[in-house]
Image: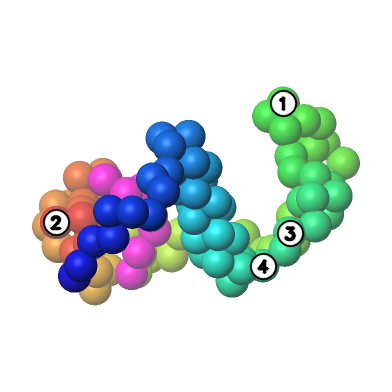
Amino acid sequence: MATDYDTPRKTDEELHEESLEELKARRADAQSGQVDIDEEEAAENLELPGADLSGEELALKVVPKQEDEFTCNKCFLVKHINQKAKGEGAKAICKDCD
């Protein structure tokens, strides 16, 4: 590629401004696929720590652990007995954590 030495050179400031414009353009392109979030709606669903939840009711039915289930000692999830990798009782570990 030939270089034209007669063309005026750009100063560092001009190069810096150009690079900022390029970055802004790339950022705008990258963000164009994002979904707009309604900040007001998000704020309504936000629950702060220590909030009074005494008047709230559960939206789902809680079922106690069944006889064919165990609680993993590492992830603390209740899993079916066929997911047990090793251990018994409180020391049982699921296949995912093994």
In the image, which disc is placed on residue 50?
Answer: 1
Residue 86 or residue 96, whichever sits in front: 96
Q: Nearer the viewer, mark 1 or mark 3?
A: 3
- First in sequence: mark 1 vs mark 2: 1
Distance between the alpha carbons at the discs numbered 1 and 3: 26 Å
Front disc: 4 or 1 = 4
Question: Closest to the observer: 38 or 15?
Answer: 15
Residue type (three-letter) at the residue carrying disc 1: Gly
Pointer 3: what residue?
A: 37
Residue visible at 38% across and 45% down?
A: 9
10 displayed left or right of 68: right
- Distance, label 1 to label 2, CA atoms, is 35 Å
User: Marks 4 and 2, how far apart in space?
Assistant: 38 Å
Magenta segment range?
72-80
Where is 74 relative to 41, above or below? Answer: above
Residue at the image point whose x is 49% and y is 55% from the top: 22
Distance in Å between CA atoms under marks 2 and 3: 39 Å
Question: Which residue is situated farthest in the top direction here?
Answer: 50
| Disc sitting over residue 5 in the figure | none
Is disc 2 surrounded by few (<14), some (14 to 19) or many (20+) residues within 10 Å? few
Task: Examine the image and state in which quarter residue 59 appears.
Answer: bottom right
Q: CA distance from mark 4 to mark 1?
A: 31 Å
> Label 4 belongs to which residue?
35
User: What is the distance, in whole Å, between disc 4 and disc 3 at their CAs?
Assistant: 6 Å
Q: Position of residue 76 (x, y in %)?
A: 36, 48
> Which is more N-terminal, label 1 or label 4?
4
Location of residue 49 in the rendering, given as x and y in whole percent from the top left corner: 68, 29
- The residue under the point 46% across, 59% down is 65
Q: Determine which residue is flagged by label 2.
A: 98
